[in-house]
Amino acid sequence: GEDVEQSLFLSVREGDSSVINCTYTDSSSTYLYWYKQEPGAGLQLLTYIFSNMDMKQDQRLTVLLNKKDKHLSLRIADTQTGDSAIYFCAEKYSGAGSYQLTFGKGTKLSVIP
Amino acid sequence: ETGVTQTPRHLVMGMTNKKSLKCEQHLGHNAMYWYKQSAKKPLELMFVYNFKEQTENNSVPSRFSPECPNSSHLFLHLHTLQPEDSALYLCASSQDLSRNTEAFFGQGTRLTVV
């Protein structure tokens, strides 16, 4: 079945860049997403990339997609303490006539002041 | 604020209780979802509704019973739950089930079964 893998933890110093990595298995993935979950909250869509793109930039966020290696990354420039959260990678795949999301376990980003 | 509201935010229930979780969206979306988020596990898709019709049931035990009376509301009825059902239950909605639609999530209901 579909599988999305992420490392569970990442610590960075405030002001540095954070890079969160994700690998996926479904070659028919159409869209890939990054969601952010702050403590006690639901998931907030941060950004997404269509599978025919290599890169997407949105302010401090840069998404890189290597479709050949099925590797997705999220770079957060000038990381702030408010960026501390769990970041979920998700892929949208085709199943049973509709498109569904499969999520990774999430990467907990800790920002050290 | 994503436009998807879940109530209650927290729920503690005994194994013999019956309770319901509620999800509401006024985004004009036609698809709604229930996900289960357990510690150290990926989000698990439980149910999908599209235009009030259930389109997915990912082998969820019958002690979880969804209800979708209209496109704006989704319920999850709970009865005779087990302690391992304790988790964060997330509701989401999207315009439809096509590939280029985004899912918007509620803040979740933190369920504890004692």
Image (tube, coloured by chain):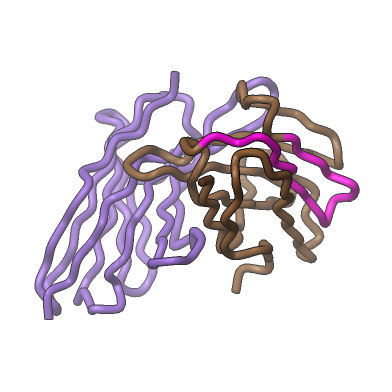
Chain colours: A purple, B brown
x and y percentages locating residue B101 in the rendered image: 64, 48
Residue in front for this viewpoint, A33 or B26: B26
Instruction: Indicate whether B71 appears above or below B4.
Output: above
> In the picture provided, is B111 more to the left or to the right than A4?
right
Q: Residue furthest right?
A: B69
x and y percentages locating residue B89 in the rendered image: 56, 49
x and y percentages locating residue A109 in the rendered image: 23, 61
Going 68% across and 39% down the picture, which residue do you hit? B98
Residue in front for this viewpoint, A20 or B26: B26
Residue in front for this viewpoint, A83 or B18: B18
> In the picture provided, is A7 more to the left or to the right than B22?
left
Instruction: Indicate whether B1 appears above or below B104.
Output: below
Going 22% across and 46% down the picture, which residue do you hit? A8
x and y percentages locating residue A76 in the rendered image: 25, 66
The N terminus of chain B, quarter of image: bottom right
Region in magenta? B65-82
Going 16% across and 56% down the picture, which residue do you hit? A10
Going 33% across and 52% down the picture, which residue do you hit? A55
Q: Main secondary structure of the magenta part?
A: strand
- Counting every numbered tag in the picture gives 0
What is the quadrant of residue A27 in the picture? top left
Instruction: Indicate whether A72 appears above or below A59.
Output: above
Q: Is residue A14 magenta?
A: no
Residue in front for this viewpoint, A57 or A104: A104
> In the picture provided, is B50 more to the left or to the right than B14?
right
> In the picture provided, is B112 more to the left or to the right than B78?
left
Q: Is residue B68 magenta?
A: yes
